[in-house]
């Protein structure tokens, strides 16, 4: 992966993590945490919903990563509540 691809991936992760933090109240973890949540959310969405959205390009990636990040934040909230 080249540097441009890495920057785009981090930007999509940051946007998806921020959006997920806005959807799930109290789910924001700062800039680095949101990027991590967004990237992990994108991986989760890639496994759970391959080809689910008919949208392509960056918009489709952001939406897919946001869905995955929301799922991740919901799981984190359940684990926090259980402990």
Image (spheres, rainbow, N blue to C red):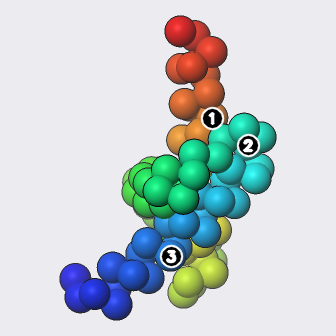
Residue farthest along the left direction in this orientation: 1
Between the C-alphas of marks 2 and 1, the distance is: 7 Å
Crowd band around label 1 with a 10 angstrom C-alpha radius: few (<14), some (14–19), many (20+) = some
Residue 82 or residue 51, whichever sits in front: 82
According to the picture, the residue beneath numbered tag 2 turns out to be 24
Q: Residue at x 53, y 9 (%)?
A: 83
Between the C-alphas of marks 2 and 3, the distance is: 20 Å
According to the picture, the residue beneath numbered tag 1 turns out to be 74
Q: Which mark is residue 11?
A: 3
* Quadrant assignment for the N terminus: bottom left
Badge 2 element = loop
Disc with the residue nearer the chain's start (2 vs 3): 3
Between the C-alphas of marks 3 and 1, the distance is: 22 Å
Q: Residue at x 56, y 83 (%)?
A: 58
**Residue 40 at x, y percent in the picture:** 42, 53
**Residue 25 at x, y percent in the picture:** 77, 40
Q: Which mark is residue 46?
A: none
Residue 40 or residue 32, whichever sits in front: 32
> Relative to 35, is 29 on the left or the right?
right
Disc with the residue nearer the chain's start (3 vs 1): 3
- The answer, for residue 33, to whether it is visible in the render is yes
Closer to the camera: disc 3 or disc 1?
3
Task: Please say if the residues under marks 2 and 1 sit with CB atoms less than 8 Å apart.
Answer: yes
Badge 1 element = helix
**Residue 45 at x, y percent in the picture:** 50, 56
The image quarter containing residue 74 is top right
């Amino acid at each position: 992966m080249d540097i441009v691809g890495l920057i785009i991936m981090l930007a999509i992760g940051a946007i998806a993590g921020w959006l997920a933090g806005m959807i799930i109240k109290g789910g924001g973890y700062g800039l680095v945490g949101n990027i991590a949540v967004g990237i992990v959310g994108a991986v989760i969405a890639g496994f759970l919903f391959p080809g689910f959205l008919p949208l392509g390009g960056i918009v489709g990636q952001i939406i897919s990563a946001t869905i995955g990040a929301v799922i991740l934040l919901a799981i984190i909230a359940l684990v926090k509540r259980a402990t």
